[in-house]
Image (tube, rainbow, N blue to C red):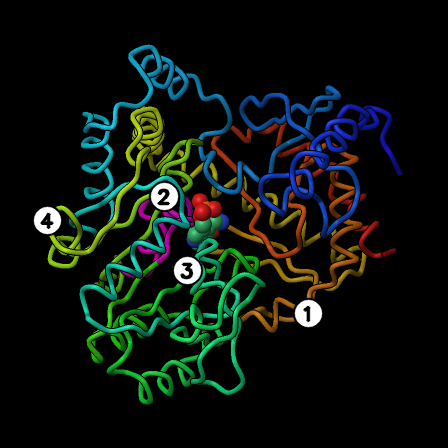
Amino acid sequence: MTVPSIADPVRSAALFERARAVTPGGVNSPVRAFNAVGGTPRFIRSAQGAWLTDVDGNEYVDLICSWGPMLLGHAHPEVQAAVLDAVRRGTSYGAPTEPEVELAEEIVARAPVERVRFVSSGTEATMSAIRLARGFTGRDVVVKFAGCYHGHVDSLLASAGSGLATFALPGTPGVPESSTALTLVLPYNDRTAVETAFAEHGDRIACLITEAAPGNMGVVPPEPGFNRFLAETCRAHGALFVSDEVMTGFRASRLGQWGLDGAVEGWRPDLMTFGKVMGGGFPAAAFGGRADVMSRLAPEGPVYQAGTLSGNPIATTAGLATLRLATDEVYAHVGAAADTVKTAASDELSKAGVAHVVQATGTMFSVFLTEGAVRDFDDAARTDQAAYAAFFHAMLDHKVYLPPSAFEAWFLSSAHDDRAVQTVLDALPHAARAAAQA
Ligand code: PMP
């Protein structure tokens, strides 16, 4: 059922057609194309606070927040003012600037890292962290978990081989077998698999990389003590523990996922990666960690890593303004709004008789349309994707823009006020009924 206040996406459709003629699939990152849910992807003209406006003039409550970064909502006046001020001075110099130092200081003050290096995307951050781990340890093997996404790094676009401790296969054409031959892919939350892999290959493992709390198969929280177990296992074998907080960093809590486990339990990762919120909606990401490991990086050490736009002054200004405004009150607000949406989604799906489970870590959550808890990628894969597509479109028809894929986190911001949340609550009964009928 279409609601009259949503205009047909005529202009979006026309732009999509033009886009497809000049760009593969018409988009610059696959999930934007609505392939998993069908229909016309909305081309966005502008955004303010919790709301997106598409090129047809339709407004939607944004539950993607640019896939995480917009913790303060869109076009936050103070972030915008800082960015405009920076732009007026110039946009890139290829020489060091003050905002880079300030943002690095802010991150070092908040996260358990002693040094950070800025890059332009999460992909670069994880790629560089792995190179550094290999350079530091003099070892080659990398361990990752199925369903954890770390960007499109060749060696990490890998799917599990047969058996627990066998090396991986390329996850996409274009990645040679030689690139994944040194990657072990294990099931998430599975301590036995980790123990087996380290027992067999421990002296060859440079690092284990994990999403601090996976959000890229939907939110699958680490079981209590799992990250600590990973950190301890790595330490026992002389491997580095790389915690990827590109999504969870400064998002799941003020101190990221680490604030929910490591800070409480008293352990630190050796290396971490960050992105999204710390770039304030601009292309900025970072990796950081122990001073002795980071000092192996050029120009201090021999491990090469560089970037023309790394630490770009506009991006670091936006990130700095965002982090400085991301107070405890912001996280409390986002958490409370998330709780309201989670509860309502679950209630409406229950009323409509749709099997589902809502999973969360800190302020991040997702709704899986499947029976029972999701603790790894195999569980997540049982999600009813047809039901999710129906749910998604009913929400869109009722002015709510959800992730166009069943395997993603839903994100809110400090700008999600009562009106925005009420719009979501009003849409949910329609969407739950649509999912039940799919
Ligand atoms: N790591 C994680 C945990 C991510 O969620 C993402 C992006 N979704 C990346 C790395 C890659 O970041 P980017 O898209 O900026 O390359």
Neighbour tally class for label 4: few under 14, some 14-19, many 20 plus, Cα within 10 Å: few
What distance separates the C-alpha of mark 1 from that of mark 4?
Answer: 48 Å
Amino acid type shown at disc 1: Arg
Residue range in magenta is 244-262
Q: Does the residue labelled 3 lie within 8 Å of ligand 1?
A: yes
- Viewer-proximal residue among 295 and 8: 295
Instruction: Name the quarter where the C terminus is drawn.
Output: bottom right
Report whether 259 appears left or right of 223: left
**Residue 323 x, y percent position in the rendering:** 32, 33
What distance separates the C-alpha of mark 3 from that of mark 2?
Answer: 14 Å
Q: Indicate which disc, 2 or 1, sits on the residue closer to the N terminus.
A: 2
Report whether 397 appears left or right of 284: right
Q: Indicate which disc, 1 or 4, sits on the residue closer to the N terminus.
A: 4
What distance separates the C-alpha of mark 2 from that of mark 1?
Answer: 30 Å
Say which residue appears at 82% left-offset and 24% top-offset.
7
Say which residue appears at 65% left-offset and 60% top-offset.
368
Q: Tag count in the figure?
A: 4
Which image quadrant for residue 130? bottom left
User: To which residue does mark 2 refer?
Assistant: 250
Amino acid type shown at disc 4: Glu
Disc nearest the viewer among 1 and 4:
4
Say which residue appears at 48% left-offset and 39% top-offset.
334
